Amino acid sequence: MLENSFYSIVDKQVNNQDVVYTIDLNANHEIFKGHFPDNPVTPGVIQMEIVKELVSDFTEKSVNLVSMSNCKFLAILNPNESPKIDVQLSLTITEDASIKVNAVFKNDATSFLKMSAVYSVN
């Protein structure tokens, strides 16, 4: 839904069930015209959707959010100031085939999001 319009994947480094995606944010995306015109801020729900899309990319399966035990927005993610970020995902497949995910959005100096969630496979 957002890949190749709001963001694009620049790199993907896989280590077993851990993966680090480097993504570029599109500061000219329509969302930023309303959120906010002179000071763009990446909405939290968009960051959560990016995690979902990257989990789908990594697992090569469509997934849905089941539950979220933790979600902390630690800093404002401005695409002009941080156009390229790393999204670190650590995935665990449970006995019922759910996918537990710990996600972190960060660059060299700042962590923007920390999130723990469970997804089901469609």
Image (cartoon, grey):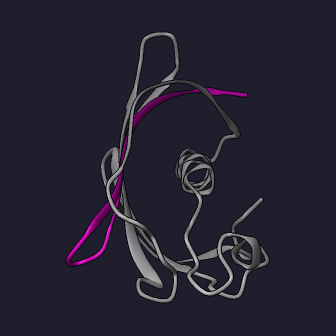
- In the image, which residues are magenta? 101-122
The secondary structure that most of the magenta stretch takes on is strand
Q: Is residue 113 magenta?
A: yes
Provide residue 9's location: percent of width, then percent of height: 55, 75
Q: Which of the 4 quarters of the picture holds residue 3?
A: bottom right
Q: Residue at x 29, y 75 (%)?
A: 107
Q: Nearer the viewer, residue 58 or 23?
A: 23
Q: Which of the 4 quarters of the picture holds residue 108?
A: bottom left
Provide residue 94's location: percent of width, then percent of height: 41, 18
Q: Nearer the viewer, residue 39 or 113?
A: 39
Q: Residue at x 70, y 40 (%)?
A: 62
Provide residue 21's location: percent of width, then percent of height: 43, 67
Q: Residue at x 62, y 87 (%)?
A: 38
Image quarter in which the N terminus is found: bottom right
Q: Nearer the viewer, residue 71 or 121?
A: 71
Q: Is residue 102 left or right of residue 63?
A: left
Image quarter in which the C terminus is found: top right
Q: Residue at x 61, y 47 (%)?
A: 56
Number of marks drawn? 0
